[in-house]
Image (cartoon, rainbow, N blue to C red):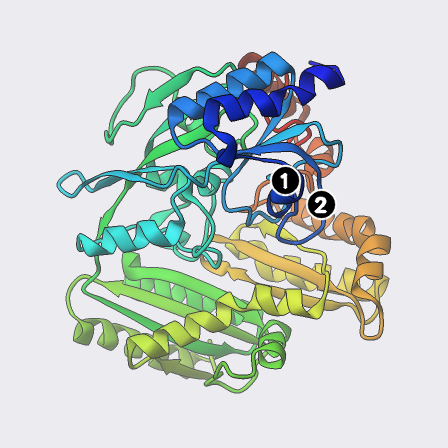
Amino acid sequence: MTADATTLQALPAALRAALGDAHVLTGTDAAAREQDWRQRWPGRALAVARPGSTEEVATVLRLAARHGASVVPQGGNTGLVGGGVPDDSGRQLVLSLGRMNRIREIDAANLTMTAEAGCVLQALQQAAAEQGLLFPLSLAAEGSCTIGGNLATNAGGTQVLRYGNARELCLGLEVVTAQGEVWSGLSGLRKDNTGYDLRDLFIGSEGTLGVITAATLKLHPQPVATLTALAACPDLPACVALLMRARARLGAGLTGFEVMNRLSLDLVRQHFPQLPQPLPGAPWTVLLELADGESEAHARGLFEGLMEAALDDGCCTDAVVAESLAQSQALWQLRESIPLAQAAAGANIKHDIALPVSRIPDFVAATDAALAAAFPGAALVNFGHLGDGNLHYNVQAPPGVSPREFLARHEPAVNTLVYDGVMAHGGSISAEHGIGRLKREELAERKSPVALGLMRAIKQALDPQGLLNPGRVL
């Protein structure tokens, strides 16, 4: 739907009448919500609306539809694919869910928590812990990302191996439709076969089908003991062998299995020299985490036995097991500091890809070689969640080349090489970051026509005016 300028410009006043002056931002007051975290997609919003309730979200969407304004839902604004910021037209309304940050209920007997979309992920983790429970979704941005955004992108993180993506941690949703109607599906049921699963339709849709305003989330018992280890491996096949051995010995207790290539930890050493790295540099370093329901002594025995066996058969060449919570947190900080170290080093070409674990070594070997031949000296920063097949396979400019210039000139060609390799090895071009604007054309090129047709039909049925996050995903 196209609206004339007069109709659009009347929307901020209508929003102020509905929400109050303090909760409608324009001009310089809106600037913080117009720029993405990577600073790749600067935008200009018509206004930023900050509703404080589901009813106010519905009012905003009804007003936006009446005035012909498209709406960009936004949580913590930590996304990496340009899906949560406005374009530069000045015609898009940013719908910020930050004020909707209440935990409505914790049902310990049912192991569920119902929370509003603007709740910061770390706050949910802490609220669960205060009840002696665990909300296991965990990622580097957890201090600022929000659960609505996590669900809208089907976030993954570091414990997918045991607990699954955000989708697997959600039992029900509350959603406001493009027409301003409220669907309340906040069920805490594990079993409910009453028609189509609307929850799964909205999770991962990146705000293009409806606005998530609240969710009922799965909780888990807190493990009795959690241990972390770091292992140095000679190559990527050895990392996969260590993963197989860890699965066999630790079973469901294996909650994390992260890999980091040498360059990724070198960047952390360069930009965060205060962070201790207890192992000497190795071609690949693995971070493992074990959650045990019996005792710390039992967990330590399992872990130390695993490490001894892995050292004996050459899966790893060195290893260390954290002796305290502080040491464990320090090991995780190494892994979580890699994106920050990359940002400090300059713009880079990011890839959030998924592959069958068995195919990862062949993919990396072939794609490393292809990139080295096409872009001599380019730095390959490869790290991620090997346990669930998700790599962050990033490419930085060669030494002496401007990072911004390298990205501007070579991103399409680099992407073609990487994504061709991903598809040849049976993978996906997006594992946990979403499509947004960054990968929209790649999706159109690489998704099957049948799948794209079904997606467009769903979009047309739920948002016939095309007002919800247009230009993202499809």
- For the residue marked with disc 1, what is the amino acid? Val
Is 99 on the left-hand or right-hand side of 460? left
Task: Identify the residue at image location x=38%, y=29%.
Answer: 53
Which quadrant holds the C terminus?
Answer: top right
In the rendered view, would you say 234 is above or below 12?
below
Marks 1,2: beta carbons within 8 A: yes
- For the residue marked with disc 2, what is the amino acid? Trp
Number of numbered labels in the structure image? 2
Task: Identify the residue at image location x=58%, y=19%.
Answer: 64
Q: Quadrant of residue 260?
A: bottom right
Q: Quadrant of residue 85?
A: top right
Q: Which residue is labeled 1 in the image?
A: 85
Image x and y of residue 171, in percent: 31, 33
Image x and y of residue 261, in percent: 59, 71
Task: Identify the residue at image location x=72%, y=38%.
Answer: 442
Is 310 on the left-hand or right-hand side of 463? left
Between 255 and 277, the residue placed more toward the observer is 277
Q: How crowded is mark 1: few (under 14 residues within 10 Å), some or many (20 or more)?
A: many
Between 158 and 362, the residue placed more toward the observer is 158
Q: Which residue is labeled 2 in the image?
A: 41
Image x and y of residue 452, in percent: 64, 24
Q: Is mark 2 on a helix, strand or loop?
A: loop
Q: Residues within 10 Å of mark 2 (few under 14, many from 20)?
A: many
Q: Which of marks 1 and 2 is nearer the N terminus?
A: 2
Is 152 on the left-hand or right-hand side of 109? right
Image x and y of residue 406, in percent: 83, 60
